[in-house]
Amino acid sequence: MPDYDAAYAQLDWEVFRSWLDYFPGGGLNIAHEAIDRHVAHGRGSHEALRWIRKSGEVQRYSYADLKTETDRFANLLVNLGLGKGARVFSMLGRVPELYIAALGTLKAGGVFCPLYSAFGPEPVRARMTIGEADVLVTNAQTYTRKIAAYRADIPSLKHVLLTQDGTDTIPGTIDLKAALAETPAQFELVQTAPEDMALLHFTSGTTGRPKGAVHVHEAVVAHHATGRIALDLRPYDTYWCTADPGWVTGTSYGIIAPLTVGATMVVDEAEFEANRWYDTLEREKVTVWYTAPTAIRLLMKAGAELPRTRDLSSLRFMASVGEPLNPEAVTWSHAVFGKPFHDNWWQTETGGIMIANYASMDVKPGSMGKPLPGVAAGILEVSETGTGVIDKPMAVGHLALRRGWPSIFRSYLNEEKRFAACFRDGWYLSGDLAMRDVDGYFWFVGRADDVIKSAGHLIGPFEVESALIEHPAVAEAAVIGIPDERAGEVVKAFVTLHAGQAGSDALAKELLGHARKLLGAAIAPRQIEIVDDLPRTRSGKIMRRLLKARELGLPEGDISTLETPA
Ligand code: ATP
Ligand code: MG
């Protein structure tokens, strides 16, 4: 996309639909667009998946290999008496079976629902119950430790497929590898329709109880278009998405988008480790890299010396999602990689990227960028009586999107009212507050739930946190509002420090002064607490509501997605 304005004027969802193959007669299947069509078009030998084991050993799958494996998986489901509409849940790390199960399920017309492999027993049980799981794909250890005890309590759950060799001795389970080996690789792909349910994703649980967002096959139109336009993906790219498979990004951009484009995906089984990440970027010659602010802040924390010794010249495009990307992180990436991270914004509910910094556009550090061609975004005033678009530049309002893009969620599972409440006057209300500047760039202010009201000011946590992070001692910051008799609420900040920095009252005082200088007394925190770590979700988002509940001695609420040491 060489020119944003021209593209915004010319491109729409009809054009994006024409970028896919579809079936004759208008059927659409995500897995066909992701795998089979490349094989049909003569790109079967192109490398689709490069899997790096924890040990460092590499295993490669071509598009043709993935076709064979996913055909087998689809056949296996059918042989088990399941097919269209079957709900297949996964609790897997970054292993090839994840990709095979996800796409094989879609081929059979089933619904794929990935869960975090690190979930404890209760969150898994709750989700499999709400989602009426038919099948669970996981490993033996997870099954025996977390699921076997209550399996009988989930009547819908018919089959458990285990990924390791020789696990057929565990009663009531199927050894996936052995079963696949015995299953024919010829499969007639189920002719799903664009509106058939395909994916079930639970939200991150940052603001409360996670919601089950339902997506359909038509979402692939958005996955593919945004892969090309927002992530700048091309068929010969080597692409690395670091998202956990249990998070929506792990599916939309960790599986579907790169494969529909025909790129090569690098998948690292191991968890974050700064040295290993730089090694991977260099050795695999990653060209497009999609990660999250929490990882970027960890890399910043690890220091600028590590990347200096590496040749990272293959990197062409770097993008970030999940939380606001602090301007400091953009500045840092310029210094370290010679190019900026491109922030983009979307939600589980939107199914794909909606607002982004595009390769051809200048990045304004701290801004989420501009709406995708085909997406109309607005800043709204929302009251009981209706909605109104706020045209004034840099005025805070509700970030909303005009309804009608293909990857919008079709429901929250079993929660009609909650779903209906997201829509007003043809708009989808995101629940986030934002601003738009004169050039049309959008700026994140905060989640509506996290915004602080202090003496008539509306304070977005992001602005305060970004100011704190600019201080050389601060690695991360999270701010909340705490009750105050005079102001209603005042700002309290929690910060973590860079390696080698020691917390002290003097430093806290210095940080208060630093914030006041940058932000002014009305917005700056009144209290700063230096902590070792911040509570975050498994998708890496800071849980401000939990900091607040703990601060005020209130109930902690749903903490099923809280990241806990493994
Ligand atoms: P829950 O809805 O359960 O509280 P969640 O909103 O964190 O969890 P996700 O769908 O994973 O679940 O995240 C979407 C939210 O993440 C957005 O609404 C926004 O608040 C935040 N977000 C995502 N990308 C960005 C970004 N680039 N800048 C700022 N915020 C972002
Ligand atoms: Mg949300």
Image (cartoon, rainbow, N blue to C red):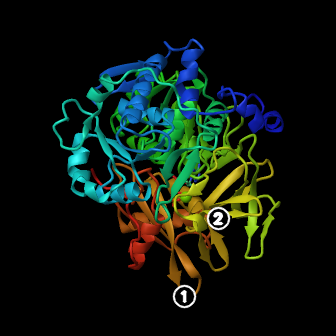
Q: Residue furthest bottom?
A: 485
Label 1's element? Answer: loop
Q: Is residue 385 left or right of residue 110?
A: right
Image quadrant where one finds the N terminus:
top right
Single out the mark in the foreground, 1 or 2: 2
Q: Measured along the vertical axis of the image, is residue 137 above or below residue 3?
A: below
Residue 102 image-quadrant placement: top left
Q: Measured along the vertical axis of the image, is residue 336 above or below residue 186?
A: below
Label 2's element? Answer: helix
In this rendering, does residue 236 appear at all?
A: no
Number of numbered markers? 2
Give residue 344's position: percent from left, percent from top: 61, 44
Circle on res. 420: 2
Name the residue beneath numbered marker 1: 485
Residue count near mark 1 (Cα–Cα under 10 Å), binned few <14, some 14–19, many ≥20: few
Between residues 437 and 449, which one lies in front from this camera angle? 449
Of pointers 1 and 2, the one earlier in the residue sequence: 2
Q: Label 2 amino acid?
A: Ala
What residue is rendered at 23% in x and 41% in y? 140
Between residues 132 and 487, which one lies in front from this camera angle? 132
Give residue 507's position: percent from left, percent from top: 41, 63
In this rendering, does residue 486 appear at all?
A: yes
Give residue 190's position: percent from left, percent from top: 54, 32
Q: Label 1 amino acid?
A: Glu
Give residue 419's position: percent from left, percent from top: 61, 62
- The span from disc 1 to disc 2 (Cα, nearest Å) is 36 Å
Between residues 149 and 513, which one lies in front from this camera angle? 149
Residue count near mark 2 (Cα–Cα under 10 Å), binned few <14, some 14–19, many ≥20: few
What residue is rendered at 45% in x and 72% in y? 548
What residue is rendered at 47% in x and 33% in y? 103
Q: Quadrant of ligand 1?
A: bottom right
